[in-house]
Amino acid sequence: MSATDQHSDTMASSAPQLAREAGINPLDYLKERGYVQDVTNADLLHRSFEEGVVTAYVGFDPTARSLHVGHMMGIMALATLQRFGHRPIALGGGGTVMVGDPTGRTAARPVMTLEEIRENLAIILTQFDRFLDFQGGRFDHNPAALLLNNADWLLELRYIDFLRDIGKHFSVNEMLAVETYRQRIETTGLNFVEFNYRLVQAYDFLHLFRTAQCLMQMGGSDQWGNITAGVDLIRRVESREAIGLVWPLLTTASGQKMGKSAGNSVWLDASMTPPYDFFQYWVNVDDADVERLLRLYTFLPMDEIRDLTSVEGAALRTAKRRLALEVTSLLHGAEAAQAADAASQALFGGTRSLDDASIPTTTVPLADVEAGMTVADAFVRAGLCSSRGDARRLAQQGGLSIDNDKIEQVDTPLPAEPGSLLLRVGKKRYMRLTIV
């Protein structure tokens, strides 16, 4: 059976649903999959999962027009809980993004206009649809997920009331001792707006605790301080116990931040990272990362993951292909994943027997070629090289080819005639250049 045939339907039973049927506690499942680095009260969380439906949220600030694969950790965590029968909240940060999270940044975020925030949020909110069920019942009587925007309550806050009722619970001395704030103060400085980010994120948790019975906030380990601030605020204001859970910040075996490819983010929006490029990102992950990524980014059972990754070297290609199929199917659908797989298989085999829709294509007008476009220009236009100099360097290293023929001279003119050329960098990066 081929990897495509083995691809799991996202609507069918998944590992979380099977674990639910087996009576496994969601916290134990999350630990096994690698989602848990710290949790504020593991005993309470374990017990709460046993006693009833737990509501949990992850926040996503719309700082760009799309989420990227680093954000997909949070989406997968929410999707996992829903398949266990619990209620997820995907929280769009239309309000918090106006403040700007200083965590992990050496300078303040650029100020965004309200129109930019609205446009980004409108696109981002649609990216949850393939992972979460907002109607309820798709995953065996699961509750419906909630999709909220914190601008709905944060923009309505009265400043003096907020300072009096919420600000009084935060110690300036404690906040200044936090590494994020301390480093910024000692280097580039920290503005007062950013200083308030912890307060408004903590207030989000309090608001959702009150209005949606939300027991838990989840996020990356860099958000531990912000999340525990919300836990503390709920304890002080409501005299109740809430829970914070964080997963490790994900980096590749090479130390690169997850979701970066050739220095660029791997976006969830198909217009920013096409399905073929998205598929290729997962096919080309480091051997050392495959098992962990299958645990975190797919709903495959652990036994199957262990079988796929029990081999080494070239034999891991099957596991990488399965990873790419599963993740691309979750985001873009099975049809897009299979088309990307077909294109990848054909290109890797050196054939060009695909229709134009299946292979990544850059189109250039014949007039541009006639005006003196060189081979180097073509590789730059196709997005395979960053500059003419980069193309020259790669050609000298034997890394460029056109229609499977090695290219040594990249400053020669491109043939000025309509048609298609297969441009390649190394063994794994391809683009069809169509001259029209």
Image (cartoon, helix red, strand yellow):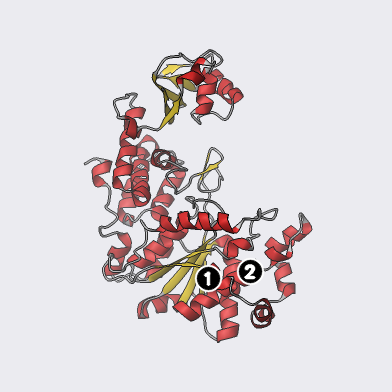
For the residue carrying disc 1, how many other residues have a C-alpha within 10 Å: few (<14), some (14-19), or many (20+)?
few
Q: Is residue 228 visible?
A: no
* Front residue of 152 and 15: 152
Q: Distance of mark 1 from mark 2, alpha carbons?
A: 18 Å
Residue 208 location in percent, x, y? 49, 75
Q: Is residue 48 above or below residue 219?
A: below
Query: Which corner quadrant of the image does residue 335 belong to?
Result: top left
Q: Quadrant of the N terminus?
A: top left
Q: Which mark is residue 271?
A: none
Residue hosting label 1: 152
Confirm or deny contact between disc 1 and disc 2 (CB under 8 A). Answer: no
Instruction: Please give the label number shown on residue 198.
Output: 2
Q: Label 1 is placed on what type of residue?
A: Asp
Name the outermost residue toward the left: 1
Vertical placement of 432 versus 1: above or below? above
- Figure quadrant of the C terminus: top left
| Residue sitting nearer the eye, 47 or 277 | 277
Give the mark nearer the N terminus: 1 vs 2. 1
| Mark 1 secondary-structure assignment | helix
Q: Residue at x 45, y 71 (%)?
A: 56
Q: Position of residue 296 (x, y in %)?
A: 42, 55
Q: Is residue 76 visible?
A: yes
Q: Residue at x 59, y 59 (%)?
A: 114
Asked if 214 appears above or below 131 in the picture, the reply is below
For this rendering, which residue is in front, 32 or 266? Answer: 266
Residue 321 picture location, percent across and down: 35, 41
Residue 45 location (% of width, % of height) = 44, 75
Residue kind at label 2, given as amino acid type = Arg
* Left or right: residue 408 compared with residue 144: right
Q: Quadrant of residue 401?
A: top left
Tag 2 secondary structure: helix
